[in-house]
Amino acid sequence: MRTCAVIPTYNNLATAKDIVLQTLEYLPVIVVADGPTDGTLESLETIQNDKLVIVSYAVNKGKGYALKQGFLKARELGYTHVLTIDSDGQHYPEDIPALLRMSAVRPEAIILGSRILSQKNMPLKNTFANRFSNFWYAFQTGISLSDTQTGFRVYPLQGLHGLHLMTHRYEAELMLLVFSAWANTPVIPVQVRVYYPPVEERVSYFRPVRDFTRISVLNTLLCILAIVYGWPRSYWRTVYYSFLFVLFAIWANIIRDFYHLFKPKDMSVLLRLRLLRGSRFFLSAFPNAPYKVCYARETSGIDVNKPCIYIANHTSLLDILAIISLHERMLIMAKGWILNNIFFGRVAKSMGVISIEEGWDNMAGTMQEYVNNGYSIAIFPEGTRSVTGELGRFHRGAFYLAEQMQLPICPILLDGFGQGLSKSPFHVGTPEELKVTILPLIQPDDASYGADYRERSRLIRKYYWQLIAHS
């Protein structure tokens, strides 16, 4: 990832230079001087910094045009991501690291600096315009956001759609969001601060009647395009994969009922074997994203005859199928709702899935019996799926269990599953691949990950964080 900042500016003599200097503390900056007439350009030219590039032209053409010139310049200079920030002083450059952290976790996503719109001195016309924009954006894309008009964002240049269609004015930023959402580029909000000066100090070039009319006309056109183009393009994967999911669920229940009827000697193992193959087929059918299992260095493969504790990061419902697909002697520990799920509840019970709500001490006897029979145990230490893809806190149960049973821990890194099937909203995205990476075993006596389960939960989470940050 190579990220720079793009700062469009017009007549912002009082604030532009200070914003640029503060932003330079975090990123290289491309300033687009959009035909200023108040000395803003001359003020910026006094900045002596090799990381500053100034693009200027004589006639004011609007924020959308300025942003486009900044994006094109960033591409020319080899940047992959662009952070945009307004030059009027409403955003705090100190919040840039928060957006960059999220962008590092989700480099394929547009990151929005979502403002708290109940701030002191917030203009009523801005509040109304933002709510108006939020409503139509939700209608056009099916995605609910609290601040679609913020100018504080991180764009992935590769996943930026609609650039050639951008208008020259304020509504251009809304167009980018809508077209990118139609192309399944995730949009993730990160809360940031905002400053609105008193009325007598405020500088704004938003023309309420003219600009609001332009936004209304644009939204009308986008709504028409949403019906004939945006919705079909956005949701064909979701419809297709939902159909496969229903077929998979029906097939799994038929297999379960067949074995339950004839009661073979090792019904749960046979059922797991069928589900293993079915899970691999289902994941391999994911549209335009190959499914593969890889092994890290010093890892030759999975020994199904040696029980261990498998742990994995958790971002999607698909994660469970990824774990099931590894081998048939795997005991899944999951939340109670899985056992009551209309699609997979009966199958999960027949497989011996154990609800973590029972408590670790209460489950110890049952799990020890499974381990004695050669089964491994799979646990998601975060406990719940992440909406954004960020790594959550690791609960200690899995590490306590490994310590009590003196079992090795096999870490698994799942990549692309959260992008493929998000937690909220339910939507099939466009990851490059669904990748399962088997990492080296951590033996019970390996002190490099801590002396007890408390330290292990913390240090192994740190290990995952480093892997995700550099993947």
Image (cartoon, rainbow, N blue to C red):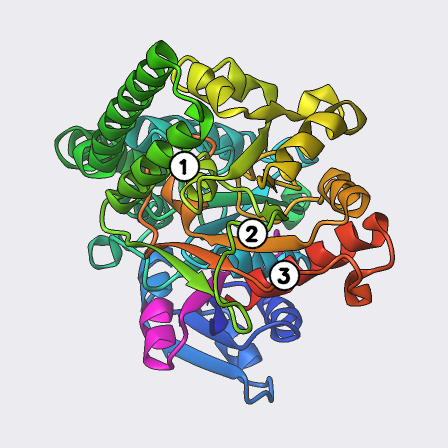
Q: Is residue 300 left or right of residue 283?
A: right
Residue hosting label 1:
208
Find the distance from the CA under tag 2 to the CA under tag 3. 60 Å
Q: Which residue is outermost to the left? A: 228
Label 3 environment density (alpha carbons within 10 Å; few <14, some 14–19, many ≥20): some
Give the residue drawn at x 31%, y 39%: 277
Is residue 270 among what the camera can see?
Answer: yes
Residue hosting label 3:
441
In the displayed structure, 337 sits above or below 207; it is above
Q: Is residue 205 magenta?
A: no
Label 1 environment density (alpha carbons within 10 Å; few <14, some 14–19, many ≥20): few
Label 2 environment density (alpha carbons within 10 Å; few <14, some 14–19, many ≥20): some
In the displayed structure, 28 sits above or below 369; it is below
* Mark 3 / mark 1, whichever is N-terminal: 1
Rendering coords of residue 8 (x, y %): 45, 64
* Pair 2/3: label in front: 3
Q: Which residue is outermost to the top? A: 261
Secondary structure beneath disc 3?
Answer: loop
User: Callout 3, which amino acid?
Assistant: Leu
